[in-house]
Amino acid sequence: MQRIYLHPLPVRIWHWLNAVTCVLLFLTGVQIRYVGIIDVISFRLAVALHSWLGFELIANFFLWLGYYLCSARIRAYHAELNPVKYFLGSLRQTLYYSYGIFKGLPNPFRPSVYRKFNPLQAMTYQILMLLLLPVQCVTGVLLWNLVRFSGPVNLLGGVRVVDTVHVLIFIFFAFYIPAHAYLGTLGRTPGQHYKEMFTGYEEAEEESTDAAE
Amino acid sequence: MDLAPPKQCVPDYRGKFRVTGAALGCGPAASVWRSVFAVTVAVVLLALTSLASSAAPSASDQQCLACHAMAGLEKPLANGGTLSLHISGDGFAQSVHAAIGCAGCHTDINLAKHPPAANPIASQRVFSVAMVQVCGTCHNSEFQRWGNSVHAALVHDGNPDAPICTSCHSPHGMMKGAAGSLPTVPCKTCHSAIFTAYAASVHGVIREHGMLAAPLCFDCHGAHDVAVPSAGVGRRDVCLGCHTEALTSHGTWLPNAQLHFDMVSCPVCHTPRAKRVVNLILYNSATQKETSRSAGIPEFENLSGAASAKQAGLDPTTLMTLLGALNRQGVEGKTGIRGRLEVRTGIEDHELTFASNAIGTCDTCHQQGAAAFQSVEVSVAGPAGMPIHYDASKEVLSSVFSIDAVGGFYAIGGSRITFLDLLFVLALVGAIGWSTVHCAARWGFRRFGNQMPRGPGKE
């Protein structure tokens, strides 16, 4: 077995802060939107918590952005510009999750320091970190103080339009959070990937080392 | 005006008046000088109001009252009605106008031809509307402000009940301060139901108990420049005129206090029993004013008429179509919707309660099915700035078709879009369901299938 240092400390701190914040934002968001159906905490407290957590998410986003902008590991987020290569890689990964994994076939993707995401992960995280999360943060800030930001809100079509965008991304997270938590159990053991996100090291077979990196 | 007495002025058997005796001469030049003299006298005597009001009528006034103090004196009108010509001598003597006397206002009376043999007055309303011009001679400032009021606009629109000066101020019994006193404020003559609500409100109650700082009608609505009370945030600004600390004090406990002040009318929370309504106001982005019905939007009339016929009000698709039609008219700017939460009636607007009884819990409004969002109306500016309301179905607040159409109004939880709720459930159930099925399949294949040993990998 070979140990690959896939997740440096800043990434791990960001990841777990992001995970906790996103879950709490999701839960307080559910409480805010469905008050009367769910009454775990008061509406007012939920709004206050949601606002503070939102700013924490934004600060955390800049931790992530700052680290990757100063690190060569940002290549993990580079888009695959060869569509054929990207399509074939995605197809292989999809076939693995929908068939190979049941048959006990090996994961077709071999991670490395600079290429730690399989094609499906790469696409998901690029959309998530470079589009959805920034849009969610911006719409959240606009909704946080509609009076101060009335100009941009009106420019975007009004409060209902901004809120709808915010809720649509919230709905994406409603799918993403449970799915991400489950996909994290698909290592050799259910806790393997969770352990990696604490230690930073992935244990891989010797032949999994990507010489190209 | 000649102040010399007529030879005789006696009522006839029908109660109408007739004049006997010789007419006194009065040429044009004499009329001008008499008018100047009358106004001068009026100004001087007005300064001595307090002294004069307690005095007996002047000699010239007594000449007028010789006939006009007779009960039942009246004049037939062209429309078949009658105009009472009876003046209470005592009442007039005590009024503030006693100082200027009859001639101060009735400058057009020519005693030589008084009473006129002809009958030129069409109706009491025509006579009264014509006579208010006289009020402006002395009360110019008030008259000008009245001219800009909603009352004057209604008069110009031909509303026979719209108030003119004499509707509120009895010209022959005008008592100083009467219009500003709770028992005698004239507004309640027409707005009796609203006044009853006001009298029972926190404002009326504390005013009744002697706190004169509590507002009476004109403190909020203006004494003469009476404005449309329900226009936009005007109501909020009126409240903040006295309650200057309200925004700060609300900000200590109410999240987004300024936003609430902009979107929610004060009585919505301070009149807890009132029925609330979401008022979706059509406005033009270029003028930043309410879209006026007079701007020519026949589609609105057609569509709202069709909706009313179905007894359901404007539905989401109709409203969306309406906005599309309005924005195709080539009018500068875009017609959009700004929403405000208000109380349903002007009566409820005045039933303000003590602050301790006001609504202070968020979930009163911020939840699906809240009473605040069961009534919806769409409004445009009508004649004289008075809003015209059209009923809309409450589904316009929760329909996916309203994302753009009702972009300017949204209350978290209370007016959320139902379709997004469905998507949310599908996403959550889909993620959990897919994970569960996938996990079960893995277990099943491992347990019962012909599975190869697992290799290394990363998911």
Image (cartoon, rainbow, N blue to C red):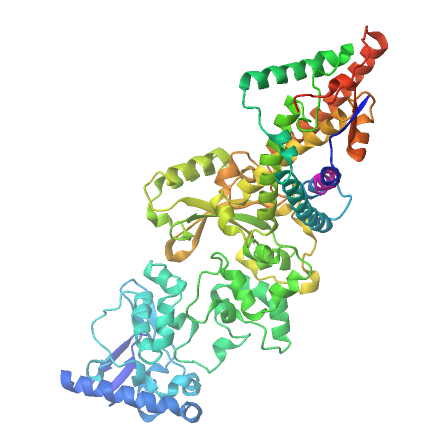
Q: In the image as oriented, which residue stretches furthest toward the top?
A: B450
Q: Is residue B302 above or below residue B366?
A: above
Residue B20 placed where, x, y %? 21, 83
Asked whether B86 or B298 is in front, the reply is B298
The reply to whether the magenta stretch includes residue A23 is yes
Q: Nearer the viewer, residue A30 or B66?
A: A30
Determine the image quadrant of residue B16. Answer: bottom left
Residue B384 lies, in percent from the top left, at 38, 58
The quarter of the rendered structure image containing the C terminus of chain B is: top right
Task: Locate the N terminus of chain B and report the quarter of the image it occupies.
Answer: bottom left
In the rendered image, the residue lying farthest to the front is A211
Is residue A195 or residue B14 the one in the foreground?
A195
Residue B27 visible at all: no
Snapshot quadrant of residue A193:
top right
Against B266, is A208 above or below? above
Task: Give me the residue at 64% from left, 46% from top.
Answer: B371
- Residue B139 in the figure: left or right of residue B354: left
The picture places residue B298, in percent across and down from the top left corner, at 35, 41
Nearest the eye: A92 or B215: A92
Q: What secondary structure is the magenta-colored segment mainly?
A: helix
Q: Is residue B98 left or right of residue A97?
A: left
Give the number of callouts: 0
Q: Is residue A170 left or right of residue B73?
A: right
Residue B95: x and y, percent?
43, 84
Q: Residue at x 61, y 45 (%)?
A: A140
Q: Residue A57 in magenta? A: no
Q: Work out whether residue A25 can be spotted.
A: yes
Residue positioned 74% across, 33% down in the render: A7
**Residue segment shown in magenta:** A17-28
Q: Which residue is located at x 35 percent, y 43 percent?
A: B297
A137 versus B111 height, above or below: above
